[in-house]
Image (cartoon, rainbow, N blue to C red):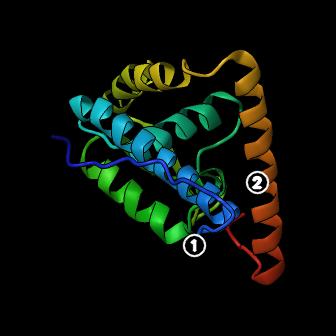
């Protein structure tokens, strides 16, 4: 028997949970389960989903004419700078990245993939778990989901940015 219990929350007019909250619960459960599947897939390479995302954005920024800096990674990952810094220190210790002093600015760090980091990034790009999970949706459902998630992300960003200026976004 699995240690994970996934139940459908039945919603009716007499429910103790309102429909919007039930939707958020389903969203959170789906995100959590997808992350667990992805982490399981990535464990063969010795990285987490977060580290794979960092490798992805370092490669993206460095190959698109920009520079991968901790600040840029913080903005792309939607994480606080100190959180990204801790992740990068760990990844450097694991031999996945190098943090190099920038020649332009004294305090600037440029982040580059090591050969080990590049190899793991290339393997992690297969994303078989994502492909398998998302295959249950039709192309139209995927477009609708993408559109809905973009709206939710924009609304949440608007709400956060109006209440406390997010210095890292």
Query: In the picture shown, does residue 136 fall above or below 169?
Result: above
Q: Which mark is residue 52?
A: none
Q: Residue at x 71, y 73 (%)?
A: 167
- Tell me the distance, in whole angstroms, between the alpha carbons under discs 2 and 1: 24 Å
Compared across the picture, whether 137 is left or right of 35 comes to right
Note whether 126 is above or below 56 in the view shown.
above
Asked which quadrant contains residue 160, the reply is: bottom right
Q: Residue furthest left?
A: 1
Relative vertical location of residue 105 with respect to residue 110 in this rendering, above or below: below
Horizontal side, residue 161 vs residue 68: left or right: right
Please indicate, yes or no, whether residue 154 appears anywhere in the rendered image: yes
Instruction: Identify the image quadrant of the N terminus.
Output: top left
Q: Is residue 120 above or below residue 138?
A: below
Q: Nearer the viewer, residue 27 or 45?
A: 27
Residue 80 percent location from the top left of the image = 56, 68
Q: Please, what secondary structure does the residue beneath circle 1 have? A: loop
Residue that badge 2 annotates: 152
Q: Between label 2 and label 1, give the one nearer the viewer.
A: 1
Q: Which mark is residue 16?
A: 1
Q: Going from the N terminus, do you reach mark 2 or mark 1 first?
A: 1
Task: State left or right for residue 44 relative to residue 131.
Answer: left
Image quarter hosting the C terminus: bottom right
Can residue 71 be spotted in the picture?
no
Residue in view at x 80 percent, y 38 percent: 147
Name the residue at the bottom extreme: 163
| Image quadrant where residue 128 sits | top left
Secondary-structure class at tag 2: helix
Task: Count residues near mark 1 (Cα–Cα under 10 Å), then give few for <14, some for 14-19, many for 20+.
Answer: few
Residue 61 in the image, given as x and y percentages of width and height: 64, 37
């Amino acid at each position: 028997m699995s240690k994970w219990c996934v139940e459908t929350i039945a919603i009716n007019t007499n429910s103790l949970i309102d429909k919007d909250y039930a939707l958020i619960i389903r969203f959170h459960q789906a995100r959590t389960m997808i992350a667990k599947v992805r982490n399981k897939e990535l464990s063969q390479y010795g990285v987490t989903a977060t580290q794979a995302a960092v490798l992805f954005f370092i490669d993206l920024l460095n190959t698109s004419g920009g520079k991968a800096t901790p600040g840029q990674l913080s903005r792309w990952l939607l994480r606080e700078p100190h959180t990204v810094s801790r992740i990068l220190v760990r990844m450097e210790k694991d031999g996945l990245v190098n943090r190099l002093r920038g020649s332009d600015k004294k305090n600037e760090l440029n982040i580059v993939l090591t050969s080990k980091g590049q190899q793991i990034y290339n393997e992690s790009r297969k994303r078989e778990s994502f492909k398998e999970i998302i295959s249950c949706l039709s192309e139209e459902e995927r477009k609708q989901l993408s559109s809905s998630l973009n709206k939710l992300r924009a609304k949440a960003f608007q709400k956060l940015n109006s209440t406390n200026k997010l210095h890292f976004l």
